[in-house]
Amino acid sequence: MKSWVLGLTALTCLAVVAAPTASAALPEIPGLPPLGGPPSNARTFEVLSASETYSVTASEGCVSGHRTFTESTTSAVPKDEANMFVPRPGGEGSISTRNSGTESSPTSGQFSSNYIDNSCQPCHYDYGSTAVNGGSIAMLLAATPDPETVKISTAIGPPEVGDVTTGLCGGPIPAAVIEPSSTVPTDQLLSGKPVTLTVAGETRLEADSLGRPASITVSYDVMMTVKANGGELQADPGGPYSVTRAGKVKLDGSGSTPRAKIEKYKWSFKPIAADCPPGVSGDAAHKEGRTTSIVALCGVKATLTVVAKNGDRDTASTTVRVRPRGGKTWRTPFSQREAKGDPRTPKEPPSATALGGGDFAFSLFGGLNVSDCGRESASSEILCPLLEKGSSSWLDNGYELRQVDDPKGPFDGDFYVVSPQIRVKRAALINPSILPGSAFYEHNLAAGQDVAGFVKAVREHEGLGNGTPHSGHGGAMKEVLATPSGDPRRVIEQLFAANREKAKNLVDAALRRVERELDVRSEDPLAEIWSGEIDFYDEYQHKWIPGPGFRIPGPAMRG
C-alpha cells in the first residue's frame, strides 16, 4: 500500500518552514516502460488534459503551517507508449504527462498560501508563491476483482512544509497519508472516447506517525482526461434501429470483429430523456448476447461492449427510435350532429326590448353545442365516455393499461396505455322558435328578410362552421383534434410510468389538460358568420322591430 509522507517541522517552542522545491513536492512514480513495445493485449492512451490541486494544513505543538499547490497541462501531451494498461486480472498500468523518452512534461504550476507560525516565539515565515514547471501529473491503473471496474490512484505526494532556516526552528512532523484512489468503469476507460479520471477528497489525521497528537488535513483534486487508442477488437452494435412503441426490436452485434476472439457481448440500454415522458428513470438496463431484443416505449441509447478472452474490450453505441402507434386506433374519433328533442334545447324566441330614445336591445338564443356522450353533462365535459359518478379517472372507462414483460429490459414492469376508447361527440341544439313554421321564421320570410340564411348561420355557429377556420363550436374542436397536442389519443399514446398508479395519474392529468384546451379553444368561434337585417318581436309594444346589421353570434344593438 502506497502512502504520502508529510514533512512538517516542530519543536516545543521553535518552528521553521523549508523553501519549496519541485523535486520534493512532485515525486516521480515508476511507470511501465515498454520493452520492445507494449504487450499485445495492452491498451495505450493519449492524455488530452490534466490538472491537480492539493493542500496540506498541519499543526503540532507550537507549529502550524499551510501550503497549496496547483498544476495543469499548458500544451498538448506527446504520445507515449508507456501510457498503457493491460486489461486482464492483475493487470496494471500508468498514465503520465511526463514523456518516458524525453523526460519532459508540458505542465506548469505554483505553490501558494505558504506560511508557518510558531506560537511560542516569533518564528514566522510567508513564502508567497513559487512557480514550478515540468512537474508530472500521473495516474496509476490497476485491475480490481471486478472486471467491470479499474482502480485509479494519484501519483502525487503532498506539499511539504519543512525547514527553511537550516534547523534553527526544528525538524519535520512525520505523518503518512494513505494513497487516495477511486474507480472507473472498464468499458468507459477503454471506449476510445474521451473519459475524465478523477481522484478527489480529503484526509484528516489526529496524530503523527509516532503517535503524538497532531492535526493534519490533506485535500486533493486530480483530474486527467484520456482517450484509449484502438485495440484489435471493434464493437459494432448495428442500427440505428426503429420500432413501433411497445414493440420488440432485435439488436444484432454480430458485425463486431474479430469474432473468434470475442468472448462476451454486453449491452446496456438507457432511455433518451428528450424522447421520453417526464419522470422516466435514466438508469441503464443490461443484457448479454451477440443478439438481443428489448421492448421499447421511448427512444433508447444502446451501447455494446465486446470483451476478449485476454480482457481487451471495445465499446460502440447506436440508437433505437420509437415510432408512435398510428392508424385509426390512435386518432380520436369526432362526430357532430343536430339533435332534436333534447331537454337542453333553448326555446326562448328572439326578442327586441326598447331601451328608450329609439334604441333597442335584441336577444337571440339560437342554439347550443353540447356533449353527445349519452347523458347530460357539464359544458366543460367534452371527452367521451363521461367520467363515472364519483370517479376522477378514465381508466377502464376510456383507456386500459398494460405492463411490459421484458426481463432486464429498460422498460420492464412499466405500465403503458392500450385500447383507447376516448372520443369526442357533439350535438347542435337549434332553438325551434327560429325554425321554419315558427312565428319568427314566417314573419321574416314574408317581410323579405334572408331568414333562411339566418337559420343556416345559426346551425353553422353551433356546428362545424361555414368553412372559415374557427367559425363554429364543433369545427373549432375538430381543428384542435387535428393537432398532435390536441388529440387525446395521440397525447396518451406516448405516456407510461413505473407503476400502475403513476401511469393512471399521468394519463388522467393529460386527458384533463386536453379537455380544457378543447373547451377554451372552442368557446368563442368566429365573431361574425352572418350579417343582415332581421326582425325581432317586441312583446311590450306588440310589434316587429327591424334589426339592421344584426350579426351572428351577436347580439348587436341598433338605434
Image (spheres, grey):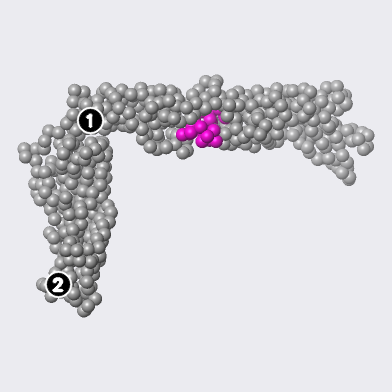
Residue drawn at the location 17% of the way across and 31% of the way down: 310
- Give residue 526's quadrant in the image: top right
| Amino acid, disc 2 | Gly
Q: In the displayed structure, would residue 475 be above or below residue 89?
A: above
Quarter placement of the C terminus: top right
Residue drawn at the location 25% of the way across and 65% of the way down: 215
Q: Mark 1 vs mark 2: which is more N-terminal?
A: 2
- Residue under pointer 1: 307
Residue 513, position as x, y percentages in the image: 59, 36
Which residue is nearer to you in this view: 383 or 521? 383
**Viewed as shown, does residue 236 lie left or right of 337?**
left
The answer to if 504 sits in the magenta stretch is yes
- Say whether residue 161 is visible: no
Residue 82, position as x, y percentages in the image: 12, 43
The answer to if 287 sits in the magenta stretch is no
Report how far apart the C-alphas of labels 1 and 2 lie in the structure.
Answer: 57 Å
Q: Which mark is residue 170?
A: 2
Range shown magenta: 487-506
**Viewed as shown, does residue 164 lie left or right of 267?**
left
- Foreground: disc 1 or disc 2: 2
Residue drawn at the location 31% of the way across and 30% of the way down: 267
The residue at the far top in this view is 328
- Give residue 436's quadrant in the image: top right
- Give residue 527's quadrant in the image: top right
- Look at the numbered disc 2 and give the secondary structure of its residue: loop
Residue drawn at the location 46% of the way across and 34% of the way down: 498
- Look at the numbered disc 1 and give the secondary structure of its residue: strand
